[in-house]
Image (cartoon, rainbow, N blue to C red):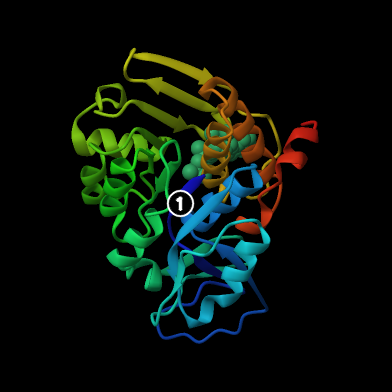
Amino acid sequence: TIWCLGSVNADHFYRLPHLPAPGETLAASDYSRGLGGKGANMAVAAARGGAPVELVGAVGPDGLWMKARLADYGVSVRHLAESAEASGHAIISVDAAGENQITIYGGANRALEPARIDTAFAEAREGDIFVCQNETNLQRAGADIARSRGLRVVYAAAPFEVEAVRKMLDVADLLVLNAVEARQLQEATGLAPEALPVAGIVITLGADGVRWIDTKTGQSRDFPAVAVTAVDTTGAGDTFTGYLLAGLDRGLSMEAAIPLAAKAAALKVTRRGTADAIPSLSEVETWAPP
Ligand code: ADP
């Protein structure tokens, strides 16, 4: 089982003739709503990738549709609390040229209660996998409980936040970063990735593929991306991470899980959308890339 301590966000997209200037009121020509948030994305990807997934987090009174959709995608939402805070959300304005402007509110994601995490993890078993990101509170508390119960701790240091990362480094077994985050981490700590105190590091490099560093042996391996024409790369990293963990949970080696996760992420970037666009394992397996 994968235990994802993570965020659930409503992504609200507005199409505008231009991005609003201070004080300006503008009518949007189009509106759409989607499920997002790094926690939700990773949980959906792991569930679509074939693993049992428990999402530990919270939505507000406005987020019940997200809870229902997560359940539709196969994510267990038994430990997704309904809080009095507004759900996490993003207001995404896109102008005619495709330029965007984004406002994010953490809301319920940032108001998780320690007691609920204790209750949730009382069910976790040795051999399960814990994963968290930086869009909630209580990551370290969750990771400590997970560790004490014999779970493998995976940490996606995204969005990058120096203080959050510093708190997590000595509890994480596996760190997953994109290239920008890897550079930010190196600048913040003064340490090259291979010198960090974690057992393994996976660095995703967009269309350039994936690097896996086994810090115990000091060995590094590169895996190519699947060549596709990308139409929307949002959620690529989250799809990759969810599929990677689902593979590990199913008993695959890193060498087998990484290429499968890269294939799933490549299929996702050919589709518009975030959580709603993450492919299922059978779609990934039968897909013959161009
Ligand atoms: P993030 O979404 O966190 O910025 P990346 O851009 O590194 O992360 O993407 C994660 C993974 O998704 C990559 O390692 C790669 O396997 C896949 N991917 C991302 N963009 C592309 C692309 N344009 N073509 C093929 N695969 C991609």
Q: Type of residue at label 1?
A: Cys
Q: Which residue is mark 1?
A: 4
When asked about the image quadrant of residue 249, the answer is: top right
Front residue of this view, candidates 75 and 280 = 75
Q: Name the quarter showing ligand 1.
A: top right
Front residue of this view, candidates 226 and 262 = 262
Front residue of this view, candidates 213 and 54 = 54
Tell me where residue 81 appears, x and y as whole percent: 44, 71
- Residue 179 in view, yes or no: yes
Tell me where residue 1 appears, x and y as whole percent: 52, 44
Q: Residue at x 30, y 39 (%)?
A: 184
Q: Which quarter of the rendering shows the C terminus?
A: top right
Q: Residue at x 68, y 54 (%)?
A: 277
**In the drawing, does residue 225 fall left or right of residue 37?**
right
Q: Residue at x 73, y 38 (%)?
A: 284
**In the drawing, does residue 249 fall left or right of residue 196?**
right
Q: Is residue 276 above or below residue 113?
A: above
Q: Is residue 177 above or below residue 256?
A: below
**In the drawing, does residue 210 fall left or right of residue 275?**
left
Tell me where residue 181 appears, x and y as whole percent: 36, 40
